Image: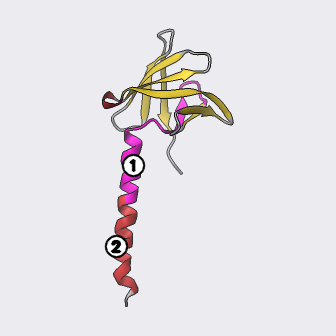
Amino acid sequence: MKTSRYLLPLLALVFVTLLQTQASAADTPVGSWKWFNDDTLVVKPDSSVWRDDKKLGDWEWTDKAKLEFVIIWQATRKDKLTLSADGNKISGVNADGEPVSGTRVPVK
């Protein structure tokens, strides 16, 4: 059957795509996060941060090599954050020096 000759390359492509998706999640805060206060925040590739349908602020890298970034809330307050090496946790401090954190919401 000629169909089986296409199956292996197709499966390989799917596998590589899944690996790239998982790897990219580990080095970016882009995604959905369960925040320490039980809100779910969405960090978008366009540098915006949302809750539901409301834009709350923007994010930017401060040191990408160290996975450090800030969220600048619309009230001009900043959270200084670090993404964990596995990409599943965010932790840091807010403008008052109080701890803030989040856990990545798995993609369904």
Question: Relative to residue 10, is residue 53 depicted above or below?
Answer: above
Query: What is the crowding at mark 1: few (fewer than 14 residues within 10 Å), some, or many (at least 20)?
Result: few
Is residue 41 shown in magenta?
no
* Residue farthest front in this picture: 46
Decide: is 56 above or below 26: above
Whether residue 42 sits left or right of residue 4 in the image: it is right
Residue at mark 1 to residue at mark 2: CA–CA distance: 20 Å
Residue type highlighted by circle 2: Pro
Please state which amino acid type lies under the numbered disc 1: Gln
- For numbered disc 1, what is the local secondary structure? helix
Q: Which residues are magenta?
A: 17-39
Q: Position of residue 24 (x, y in %)?
A: 39, 45
User: What residue is shown at x 57% (from left), y 31% (from top)?
Assistant: 49
Q: Which mark is residue 9?
A: 2
Residue 90 rendering spot, x and y as whole percentages: 44, 29
Q: Position of residue 7 (x, y in %)?
A: 38, 77
- In this picture, residue 61 sits left or right of residue 65: right
Characterize the local packing of mark 2: few (<14), some (14-19) or many (20 or more) Cα atoms within 10 angstroms.
few
